[in-house]
Image: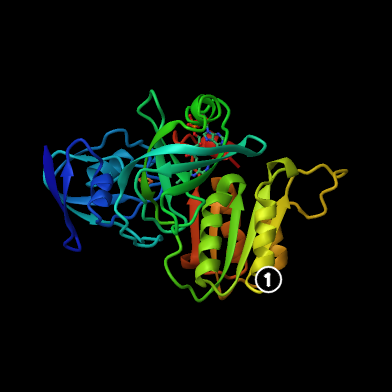
């Protein structure tokens, strides 16, 4: 059964009853704010003015009973059970893009270990995916009804060849149970995209500080390369934080990029737990401390932060101390699917 959804700005789209409202909106090319698309961040909360929904597996931490009785719902979880009139809430911190969400079948053309417990996965998709640098895809985990999000590390100039950086989570359904165990070159994968509002949307006047923890590098690679190739940002400083040298990857790639764009691009790998006796002669400590040290003010800059939630929280504090307005801090948190606060803390 399909219903009609009308948003406050007059946007109207059809929404099948077996699909979350957000998915129907994005498939129709309509806009609704979102971030994680898995019910853990609350960005997609919207208000139902008329009509009813099935809240599905919306968790009570993100959508408490008082919210439900006030007519609020999570667009990424709620399925319509009648026609809806609804308004989108709060500040939309991300950007509006209208690449329609589509299902794709892909073939793995590269699966390489690039660092400790980290792989580069390159997928050739059946038809070009239109996306903006910084967005992500959702993979279906075979044999389950689970989906997992992975940021696109390649640029939109080739929408048929999508690169991802994936870190193994011990006991994780998608990583330990599939990607790091069974997946191999030549295998077929099911994915959909693009999703997310963490993205670079055209020319930006401000100098950019890109801050990525671990595989949080992925969307920043897409943003940096696309911006450099298309002259979209006046200057870019990329900070990549890892624990040890064995966790770092794409170092040569970014050094080459720095050599190709010496006036525009700088690259700062930072290691927090590298043993003192190692041959590492780069920066040590927390990535956020490195930013704090390098900038006396961040006025006139824009930031893109991506990785574990605790790293992003620390990054935001540092940028605030250096006077960057919140509206210029774009964030993508790699929140664990369960939304388990212990896991979120551990992911730091
Ligand atoms: P699950 O089965 O979901 O988790 C297994 C157990 O580990 C659970 O207890 C869970 O709570 C806990 N757990 C899960 N993740 C972590 C963690 N990071 N640290 C500690 N404990 C954890 N990951 C990437 O590697 N690369 C990406 O580009 C990327 N992009 C993302 C983009 C978005 C928008 C989001 C929301 C997440 C992204 N992630 C990315 C994380 C990814 O989607 C999965 O959450 C991750 O791969 C774990 O999935 P899993 O099924 O293996 O583990
Ligand atoms: Fe719906 Fe994050 S996008 S809760």
Residue 166's spot in the image, x, y percent? 55, 39
Q: Residues within 10 Å of mark 1 (few under 14, many from 20)?
A: few
**In the image, farthest residue toward the right:** 277
Image point (24%, 56%), residue name:
30
Q: Seen in the image, is 165 located left or right of residue 202?
A: right
Please, is residue 96 above or below residue 101 in the view? below
Image point (65%, 55%), residue name:
253
Please, is residue 302 above or below residue 159 in the view? below
Residue 345's spot in the image, x, y percent? 57, 39
Q: Seen in the image, is 6 located left or right of residue 207?
A: left
Residue 183's spot in the image, x, y percent? 50, 29
Camera-nearest residue between 294 and 316 = 294
Residue 225's spot in the image, x, y percent? 55, 61
Camera-nearest residue between 331 and 27 = 27
Tell me the SS state at disc 1.
loop
Camera-nearest residue between 225 and 207 = 225
Kindly identify which residue carries mark 1: 262
Please, is residue 34 above or below residue 318 in the view? above
């Amino acid at each position: 059964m399909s219903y009609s959804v009308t948003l406050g700005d007059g946007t109207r789209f059809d929404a099948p009853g077996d699909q979350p409202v957000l998915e129907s909106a994005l498939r129709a090319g309509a806009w609704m704010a979102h971030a994680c698309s898995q019910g853990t961040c609350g960005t997609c909360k919207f208000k139902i003015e008329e009509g009813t929904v099935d809240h599905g597996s919306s968790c009570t931490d993100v959508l408490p009973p008082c919210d439900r009785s006030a007519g609020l719902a999570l667009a990424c979880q709620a399925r319509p059970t009648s026609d809806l009139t609804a308004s989108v809430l709060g500040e939309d911190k991300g950007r509006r893009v209208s690449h329609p969400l589509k299902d794709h079948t892909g073939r793995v053309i590269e699966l390489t270990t690039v660092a400790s417990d980290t792989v580069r996965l390159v997928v050739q998709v059946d038809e070009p995916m239109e996306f903006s640098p910084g967005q992500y895809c959702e993979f279906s985990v075979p044999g389950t009804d689970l989906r997992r999000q992975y940021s696109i590390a390649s640029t939109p100039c080739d929408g048929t060849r999508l690169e991802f950086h994936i870190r193994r989570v011990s006991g994780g359904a998608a990583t330990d149970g599939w990607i790091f165990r069974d997946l191999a070159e030549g295998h077929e994968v099911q994915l959909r995209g693009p999703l997310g509002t963490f993205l670079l949307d055209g020319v930006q006047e401000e100098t950019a500080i890109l801050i990525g923890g671990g595989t949080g590098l992925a969307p920043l690679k897409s943003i940096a390369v696309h911006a450099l190739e298309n002259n979209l940002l006046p200057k870019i400083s990329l900070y990549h934080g890892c624990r040890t040298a064995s966790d770092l990857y794409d170092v040569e790639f970014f050094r080459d990029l720095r050599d190709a764009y010496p006036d525009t691009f700088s690259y700062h790998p930072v290691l927090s737990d590298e043993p003192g006796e190692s041959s590492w002669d780069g920066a040590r400590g927390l990535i956020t401390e490195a930013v704090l040290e390098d900038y006396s003010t961040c006025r006139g800059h824009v930031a893109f932060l991506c990785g574990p939630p605790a790293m992003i929280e620390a990054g935001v504090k540092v940028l605030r101390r250096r006077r960057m307005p919140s509206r210029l801090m774009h964030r993508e948190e790699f929140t664990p699917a369960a939304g388990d606060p212990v896991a979120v803390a551990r992911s730091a």
